[in-house]
Image (spheres, helix red, strand yellow):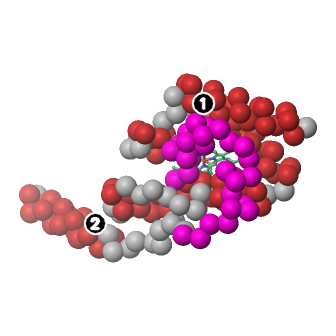
Amino acid sequence: MKRKFKKIALVFFLVFIAIQFYQPKQNISNSFDIGKNFANNYKVPPTVLNSLQKACYDCHSNNTKYLWYDYIQPARMFVEDHIKNGKEQLNFNEFASYSNRKQQSKLEAISKEVKSGDMPLSSYTLLHHDAKLTKQEKEAIIAWINKTLNSKN
Ligand code: HEC
């Protein structure tokens, strides 16, 4: 019984080591198109921008700030999956390339996600404590979005 357990543990260990070699391309881009970038096209107060950057940009921009444990498999696969899906839905670096209508609806969606607390994902804030938004930070984001949407209508 003991020997069998040892064998199983060894197999798990070897599989764990083997999957470490699978490291997909990082979400880090050096080129930057300010024409499409959110912060270059909206007058975002620095505090609001800071909040969005710390809480959202890892999955919703072309540059993720990876932490050392983000590289450990199988977590890495989940991280990249979140980034891929997150960017498909919302990419702050390409925000201004969306149609006006889409930009408006994305701003509404951001406000909704922040209000409900569904974003940033809780699986993410579990390890990225800094990404949690305080009540004041949330209120500032929502207030700025309301103001921006009202001034556009
Ligand atoms: C850990 C990665 C991650 C972080 C951090 C994150 N998101 Fe997301 N976000 C996703 C993923 C994955 C999806 C797509 C799947 C889903 O809706 O769950 C998504 C979807 C969304 C959508 C839905 C788009 C739509 O039109 O319905 C919005 C809006 C959004 N996120 C806003 C935010 C905001 C605002 C923040 C920061 C406060 C944030 N997200 C932080 C991963 C993330």
Q: Secondary structure at mark 1?
A: helix
Of all residues, the one furthest to the left in this rendering is 2
Across and down, in percent, residue 141 comes to 65, 34
Q: Is residue 90 visible?
A: no
- Residue assigned mark 2: 16
The answer to whether residue 26 is left or right of residue 15 is right
Q: Is residue 41 visible?
A: yes
Cα distance, mark 1 to mark 2? Answer: 39 Å
Which quadrant of the view contains residue 150? top right
Q: Amino acid at mark 1?
A: Lys
- Residue assigned mark 1: 138
At 10% across and 58% down in the image, what residue appears?
1
User: Of 64 and 36, which appears nearest the observer?
Assistant: 36
Residue 22 forms part of the magenta stretch? no
At 60% across and 30% down in the image, what residue appears?
138
Which quadrant of the view contains residue 10? bottom left
Across and down, in percent, residue 119 comes to 58, 40
Answer yes or no: disc 1 within 8 Å of ligand 1: no
Please tell me whether mark 1 or mark 2 is closer to you in this view: 1
Q: Which residues are magenta?
A: 30-58
User: Is 122 rendered above or below residue 36?
Assistant: above
The answer to whether residue 37 is left or right of residue 147 is left
